[in-house]
Image (cartoon, grey):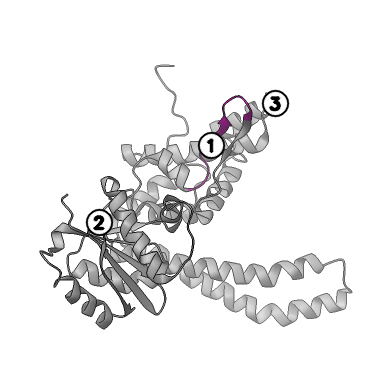
Amino acid sequence: MEIRYYIGIDVSKATLDWAVFDGKTTVLQTQSPNSEKGIKTVLRLLKELPDFSVQFSIICLEHTGIYNAVVLQQLVAASFPVWLESSLQIKQAGGLQRGKSDQIDAQRIAEYAFRFRDCIRIWQPPRQLLKDLTNLSALRQRLLLVRSQLQQPIDEQAGFVEAKQHKELIKYCRASLKSINSDLEKVNQQMAKLIENDQHLKELFTLMTSIPGVGSATATEVILATDEFKAITDPKKLACHAGVAPFEHRSGTSVRGKTRVSQHARKRLKSLFHLAAMSAIRSKGEIKDYYVRKVAEGKNKMLVLNAVRNKIIHRIYAVVRRGEKYDKNYTNTLA
């Protein structure tokens, strides 16, 4: 696509910093409130630039969670091409940097869009249903964290404090834990209802949960992370995104590091795939047989477990691609 203006936006809770780069210099720089009114004011300024056209511009901004919700909504409504990029990707592409401010960050984002214009990925907004599921999933994670923060210390104190005092501690938290569990149940029911009432999500969910070890939480997170398998279409890319893809660490003849996974990952997804793998190797089947065989050969247990995570990811894509449930008794006729 032919682009005349590369627009970078640095997003914060209260404000948006805008920088417009034409390939040679910054032709406009301004700040606006992170609100519908403030955004519309800047969009009018953009349209006053010489030879400005929405279709010949690109707006680049970083993933910032809920803080970019309003600006994304307004940009889509105005038909602007939008490029959502990882903040880490933009930072590392900038090399050694001196000084930092919101205005400078907006300039760097605009210049990043120009430098990597051959790698532009136009962002498409997810369905409203997925937005609702994302919010419920985030709430579920917070509730689980609060419950763990209350329950775990009490469990760990058993045997180390007097029995009478331990009972009192449990009594003090009982009402809170009961309320949290009740809220968790309601959130889980609402998430299940949303999935059940949407035929496409229901089919994806049924296919994925047919795989040993893959439960409702893992299936839901995969759907959200991949935007129903539209944003991440390759199992290797999902493995990389989830931090379970191994990478070599070597250079020349002197550096011979161990093959390892990247720490730049979607932590929640990585944790769920770990739990899925742990569940799969405890259940009778070919995944458990694979794990037992490799460990017996002397392979490191964590390396084998990571291989199991990758196997689960590839099986998820396989069942979705075929549109058929996982067959535990399948044998390769070509073997």
Nearer to us of marks 3 and 2 is 2
Quarter of the view holding residue 279: top right
Residue under label 1, please give it.
246
Cα distance, mark 2 to mark 1? 40 Å
Q: Position of residue 309 (x, y in %)?
A: 53, 40
Nearest the viewer among 27 and 200 is 27
Residue shown at 64% from the left, 38% from the top? 302
Q: Amino acid at mark 3?
A: Gly
Q: Position of residue 36 (x, y in %)?
A: 27, 80
Residue under label 3, please give it.
298
Residue shown at 47% from the left, 30% from the top? 329
**Crowding near pointer 2: few (<14 within 10 Å), some, many (20+)?**
few
Please tell me which of labels 3 and 1 falls first in the chain: 1
Kind of element beneath mark 1: strand
**Crowding near pointer 3: few (<14 within 10 Å), some, many (20+)?**
few
- For the record, the magenta segment spans 242-255
Tell me: residue 321, above or below residue 162. above
Nearest the viewer among 199 and 71 is 71
Tell me: residue 269, above or below residue 31. above
Q: Position of residue 287 (x, y in %)?
A: 55, 34
Please tell me which of labels 2 and 1 falls first in the chain: 2
Kind of element beneath mark 2: loop
Q: Amino acid at mark 1?
A: Pro
The circle drawn on residue 24 is 2
Kind of element beneath mark 3: loop
Tell me: residue 265, above or below residue 253. below
Nearest the viewer among 133 and 59 is 59
